[in-house]
Amino acid sequence: MIIIPEQFAINLNDADYVNKCLNDYWDSYSDMTIPAVEARLLGLKTEYQYAIEKRPETKWYYGTGDVKNETSKYRSYLRLGIGYNLPLYKFTSKILGFEIFSKEAYILKIKKMIGKNLTKDHIFGVTDVGIETFSNYICCDWDLDYMVNEYIPNNLYQHFECRMLKSEHQKQDEYDTNGVARGKHTIEEKISMKHYEDVVDLPLVINRIEK
């Protein structure tokens, strides 16, 4: 059973509904998602292992292979292969049955005044999600069954986006103290929403969407 971490759940105004929706999604679409995610992970693993074997010639792109603690071009690429584009079948707000809003953004939605005032924020950061997922794949000794049957479903929440005011999302100018902090928090701190504190009012609003 999929249950989002308590540290994250307390920062949502309808966490039980989110848990239900995630379980419904996985029950309905895991058969389409699992083989696609397996293909992605196997591809990344094969590339990584081959490159590490070919060091030092490949070090300029892949570093030493420590994607958790060392910057490299390959580490940055994981934000695309996993963070942005992990092939989760129909992982959309409409299919899930909800959208996530900041309180200020939700007020504009209720007033039908969204206009061009909102943007979407990847709550956990696509780079961090890519690194965290691939690091866990390495640490479990490339156990693909574990990744697709346990790790991925239990961490679907890390692919959530939040609709918020543009002014909440990033600084408007160099004198602005607002804006969600970038690259200053661990994934554990993000699960507790430390990067949203003092910028976005918590808890976030879960807007139910009729499936």
Image (tube, grey):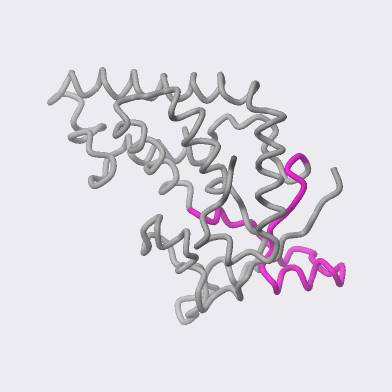
Position of residue 184 relative to residue 76, above or below, is below
Spot occupied by residue 171 in the image (x, y as percentages of width and height):
52, 72
Quadrant assignment for the N terminus: top right
Where, quadrant-wise, is the C terminus in this rendering?
A: top right
* Up/down of 118 relative to 156, above or below: below
Q: Is residue 160 magenta?
A: no
Q: Is residue 158 left or right of residue 147?
A: right
Relative height, residue 138 to residue 1 (above, below): above
Pinpoint residue 43: horizontal percent, then vertical percent.
41, 20
Q: Quadrant of residue 29?
A: top right
In the rendered structure, which segment of residues is drawn in magenta? 95-124
Q: Nearer the viewer, residue 169 or 17?
A: 17
Along the viewing direction, whichever of 2 and 209 lies nearer the viewer: 2
Name the residue located 45 percent from the left edge and 45 percent from the top edge.
Answer: 129
Is 28 left, or right, of 155 in this rendering? right
Whole-percent x and y of residue 37?
A: 52, 25
Q: Is residue 102 magenta?
A: yes
The relative height of residue 2 versus residue 35 in the rendered view (above or below) is: below
Looking at this rendering, what residue extends furthest in the left direction?
Answer: 56
- Splitting the image into 4 quarters, where does residue 138 fall? top left
Q: Position of residue 173 (x, y in %)?
A: 51, 75
Total count of labels: 0
The residue drawn where x is 85% and y is 69% is: 110
Describe residue 106's horizontal placement relative to residue 7 as left or right.
right
The one nearer the camera, 28 or 32, is: 28
